[in-house]
Amino acid sequence: MEVRIKAIHFDATAKLEEFINKKAQKLARRNEEVTECDVTLEVVKPKTSLNKQASIKLIIPNREDVFASKIADTFEEAIDLSIDALERQLEKLDKNK
């Protein structure tokens, strides 16, 4: 699975990118059909708490894409929340096959 990370108006650290790749690969193992994972990181409303947004889109050929976007105090937390939402969506897709 190809993972693309886009950080808007900042540079993501290598540690953060490694964290995202690890989580994305975990998702890929749960659903073999996922071919691409687009991750967008953005700081919304600077100078407030809960200002880190992570949006993740999974591309599944011949099926509709799966998308989740969450805001949290840290990018890691936002990624975890988004991954949880995506896992639930993938479970629903698998049941509806």
Image (cartoon, grey):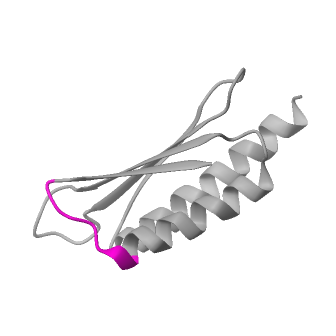
Q: How many dots with numbers?
A: 0
Describe residue 7's horizontal placement relative to residue 97 as left or right: left
88 sits left or right of 86 in the view = right
* Placement of 15 over or under 53, stated as above or below: below
Observer-nearest residue: 3 or 54?
3
Q: Is residue 64 above or below residue 84?
A: above
Q: Main secondary structure of the magenta part?
A: loop
Q: Nearer the viewer, residue 71 or 33?
A: 33
Q: Position of residue 14 (x, y in %)?
A: 34, 75
Does the magenta-highlighted stretch encompass residue 14? Answer: yes
- Determine the residue positioned at 68% across, 41% down: 34
Residue 48 in the image, given as x and y percentages of width and height: 16, 69
> Magenta stretch?
9-15
Instruction: Find residue 24 and report its image quarter.
Output: bottom right
Residue drawn at the location 38% of the way across and 73% of the way down: 16
Q: Quadrant of the C terminus?
A: top right
- Relative placement, left or right, of 76 versus 50 is right
Residue for point 20% across, 55% down: 44
Q: Residue furthest front?
A: 2
Residue 2 image offset from top left, x and y in percent: 55, 47
Q: Name the residue at the bottom extreme.
A: 15
Residue found at the far left of this picture: 47
Q: Residue at x 20, y 64 (%)?
A: 11
Q: Nearer the viewer, residue 32 or 45?
A: 32
